[in-house]
Image (tube, coloured by chain):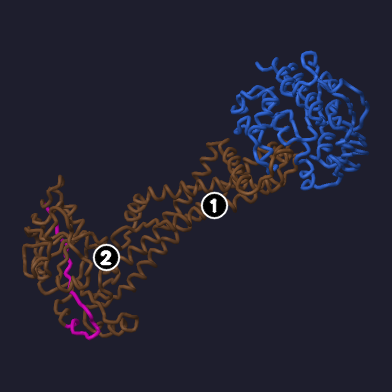
Chain colours: A brown, B blue
């Protein structure tokens, strides 16, 4: 008897090898079951990535606005807020003197006026679709206040982009482009940029020629797709010399109490609303949370279906191998050995599904992002799907847990077989 | 060679089938010694398989006493019976019962996984050589003939170094020549290794090759005869001290091409 008794990792490796070979016996069935688990995991990972990504995108977009409070014309505050976050039309305007009245508030640390307009780019592109018309968001800004609000804003470097700078406050022919706006138009510093702007009350647009004096580096926000002009120039070109769109405000002390005080003070102005961006953030997140709950329900259904599929596959496999299990028992397999073997097969199916599903979710995240954005207006720019390693770890662990759970019954059935009956059934 | 490895007294195995009680075994007394080959003959339904299931601890008798390798096993539950089987009993089945996704060598080593024993590849190869399948070690069962598969099953039964080898219709799916080779191998294992061999067969010609022949009818022993001596029928070509390997190679030469 020179055969040494073995326990632990050696025996476990032998079981893993045996379980893997059992699964290869019916490759199509095993493959389909793995695919079912993978599908459920893909949905779950994509959802997890969306939940994280969207929350992060909202957070980032709002933080990158640089201010905590907006004063704007009365209307839907969330529509106004998302317009700032993502761009849009249907703009409402404030009287320009609102700025002069509010800026003296002692609680204000910084205030900057922003004028937002939409210009038509026509025949301005050097791309193949030069004849096509499209729109771009134009932000008229006060550079001094804007830079205080967004100190992280820097100019893009590199060949053709060096020496970028902000325009002079009264320069009527200078423009700064956001990162994506420049990429789309294939413009560099020193290039010419054309935009058609229809002044308020006028039927026809007026073509303006600008010199690109700077291209901003990527920020991951709406600013990337924006064209910046001096605020007074923008107001003049859009035919609204006495109006502005938003006052962005940073308070010296920002909390719910101070916010309420500030709001009460300035709501007395006619045609004005005060919007706290924390409130906007919470509302945006909770609005999408409803959709996320529905997707989570779909994911839960997919997981339940996958679970049933796994149980069914392993049970079928157990029934098919009834005689074989009886023979294993005759050969010395204890009840727990059979349980462990069948359980391992289930866990391996789910582990493979977990890994495959996670990979599919990672590879398909761009597609999912495009689909989500096509189906719903999420109110933020930038990526809304963020599949982190933690999401993958949770998903794969969840799939393994699914395997542990779904393997219990088939493993119990197999291990409970009496060898004499099992061998007899297979004969 | 006189050690009793199985001893059963008054063995009964009754089943309920609806309102009817089926007496599959109805008071069987039997003892088997180490190195002895006992074949159990009888028509279908006579209780052959039930008897070897009970004697090999796969099933428990309804009544009677049973000692296997010195341990009293009557009335033990399956959890205890498996402990008796482990390392004491080896099994060969009519349908070979090889795992289709495992190679020959992996099938042979399978019981070691369940017995928590480390694989000794040299020993496995030695056993494969014994059954004449060295050149088929890496083949899958579907690439083997019936005789080769049965020899793999025998090798698998031997890997755990059993004291008792139980073979239920081991020649049932084999042609006569291959069946003879398998029976001769059993003789050698009994003679050289002292393994007690208990086999059932429908074929009286194979049955009478055993050292003792027990005939069952309606769950009772109706005849017990002394058969052939426990040595190879091909002994004329083999020296008395020849190894099991050499003898089996000689025996299986005629079936290598099956």
Tell me the quarter of the picture where residue A330 sits. Answer: top right
- On what subunit does the disc labeled 1 rest? A
Tell me the quarter of the picture where residue A77 sits. Answer: bottom left
A275, above or below A332, in the image: below
Quarter the C terminus of chain A occupies: top right
- A402 and B123: which is toward the camera: B123
Element at badge 1?
helix
Q: Which mark is residue A85?
A: 2
Query: Does residue A200 appear in the picture of this structure?
Result: no
Q: Please tell me whether residue A111 belongs to the stretch shown in magenta.
A: yes
Q: Earlier in the sequence, mark 2 or mark 1?
A: 2
- A120 and A163: which is toward the camera: A163
Q: Which mark is residue B106?
A: none
The answer to whether residue A141 is left or right of residue B117 is left
- On what subunit does the disc labeled 2 rest? A
Q: State the residue lying farthest toward the top.
A: B236
From the top left corner, tell me how far across and down residue A316 is, in percent: 62, 41
Q: To which residue does mark 1 refer?
A: A400
Query: Does residue B65 appear in the picture of this structure?
Result: yes
From the top left corner, tell me how far across and down residue B233 is, in percent: 81, 17
B59, above or below A188, in the image: above
From the top left corner, tell me how far across and down residue A104 is, in percent: 18, 84
Quarter the N terminus of chain A occupies: top right
From the top left corner, tell me how far across and down residue A120 is, in percent: 14, 57
Q: Residue at x 50, y 51 (%)?
A: A302
The magenta-colored residue range is A101-122
Element at badge 2?
helix
Q: Are marks 2 and 1 in contact (CB under 8 Å)?
A: no
The answer to whether residue A198 is left or right of residue A85 is left
Q: Are marks 2 and 1 on the same chain?
A: yes
């Amino acid at each position: 008897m020179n055969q040494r008794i073995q326990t632990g990792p050696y025996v476990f490796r032998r079981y893993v090898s045996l379980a893997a070979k059992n699964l290869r016996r019916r490759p199509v069935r095993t493959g389909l079951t793995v695919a079912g688990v993978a599908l459920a995991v893909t949905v779950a990972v994509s959802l997890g990535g969306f939940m994280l990504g969207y929350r992060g995108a909202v957070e980032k977009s709002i933080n990158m606005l640089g201010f905590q409070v907006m004063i704007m014309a009365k209307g839907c505050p969330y529509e106004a807020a998302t317009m700032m976050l993502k761009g849009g039309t249907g703009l409402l305007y404030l009287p320009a003197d609102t700025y002069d009245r509010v800026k003296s508030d002692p609680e204000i640390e910084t205030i900057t006026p922003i004028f937002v307009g939409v210009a038509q780019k026509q025949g301005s592109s050097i791309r193949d679709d030069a004849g096509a018309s499209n729109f771009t968001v134009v932000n008229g800004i006060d550079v001094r206040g804007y830079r205080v609000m967004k100190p992280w804003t820097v100019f893009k470097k590199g060949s053709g982009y060096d020496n970028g700078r902000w325009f002079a406050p009264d320069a009527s022919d200078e423009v700064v482009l956001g990162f994506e706006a420049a990429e789309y138009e294939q413009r560099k510093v020193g290039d010419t940029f054309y935009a058609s702007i229809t002044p308020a009350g006028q039927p026809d647009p007026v073509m303006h020629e600008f010199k690109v004096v700077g291209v901003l580096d990527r920020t991951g926000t709406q600013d990337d797709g924006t064209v910046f002009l001096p605020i007074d120039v923008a107001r003049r070109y859009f035919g609204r010399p006495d109006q502005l769109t938003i006052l962005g405000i940073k308070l010296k002390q920002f909390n719910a109490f101070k916010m309420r005080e500030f709001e009460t003070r300035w709501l007395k102005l006619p045609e004005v609303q005060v919007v706290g961006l924390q409130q906007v953030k919470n509302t945006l997140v909770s609005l999408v949370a409803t959709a996320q709950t529905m997707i989570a329900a779909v994911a839960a259904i997919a997981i339940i279906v996958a679970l049933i599929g796994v149980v069914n596959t392993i049970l079928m496999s157990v029934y098919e191998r009834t005689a074989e299990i009886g023979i294993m028992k005759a050969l010395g397999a204890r009840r727990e050995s059979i349980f462990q073997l069948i359980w391992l097969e289930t866990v391996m199916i789910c582990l493979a599904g977990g890994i495959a599903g996670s990979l599919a979710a990672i590879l398909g995240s761009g597609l999912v992002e495009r689909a989500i954005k096509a189906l719903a207006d999420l109110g933020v720019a930038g990526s809304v799907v963020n599949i982190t390693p933690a999401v993958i770890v949770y998903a794969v662990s969840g799939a393994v847990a699914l395997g542990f759970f779904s393997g219990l019954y088939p493993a119990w059935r197999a291990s409970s077989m009496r060898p004499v009956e099992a061998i007899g059934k297979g004969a | 060679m006189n050690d009793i490895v199985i001893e059963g007294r008054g063995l009964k195995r009754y089943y309920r089938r609806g309102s009817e009680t089926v007496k599959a075994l109805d008071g069987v007394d039997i003892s088997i010694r180490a190195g002895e080959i006992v074949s159990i003959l009888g028509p279908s339904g006579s209780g052959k398989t039930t008897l070897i299931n009970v004697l090999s601890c796969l099933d428990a008798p309804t009544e009677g006493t049973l000692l296997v390798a010195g341990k009293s096993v009557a009335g033990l539950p399956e959890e205890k019976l498996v402990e008796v089987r482990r390392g004491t009993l080896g099994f060969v089945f009519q349908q070979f019962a090889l795992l289709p996704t495992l190679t020959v060598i992996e099938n042979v080593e399978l019981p070691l996984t369940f017995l928590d024993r480390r694989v000794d590849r040299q020993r496995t190869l030695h056993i494969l050589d014994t059954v004449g399948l060295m050149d088929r070690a890496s083949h899958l069962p579907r690439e083997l003939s019936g005789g080769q598969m049965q020899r793999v099953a025998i090798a698998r039964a031997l890997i755990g170094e059993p004291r008792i080898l139980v073979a239920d219709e081991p020649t049932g799916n084999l042609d006569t020549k291959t069946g003879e080779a398998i029976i001769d191998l059993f003789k050698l294992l009994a003679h050289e290794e002292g393994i007690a061999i208990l086999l059932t067969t429908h074929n009286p010609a194979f049955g009478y090759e055993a050292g003792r022949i027990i005939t069952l009818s309606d769950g009772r022993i109706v005849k017990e005869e002394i058969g052939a001596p426990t040595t190879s029928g091909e002994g004329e070509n083999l020296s008395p001290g020849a190894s099991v390997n050499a003898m089996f190679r000689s025996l299986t030469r005629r079936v290598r091409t099956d």
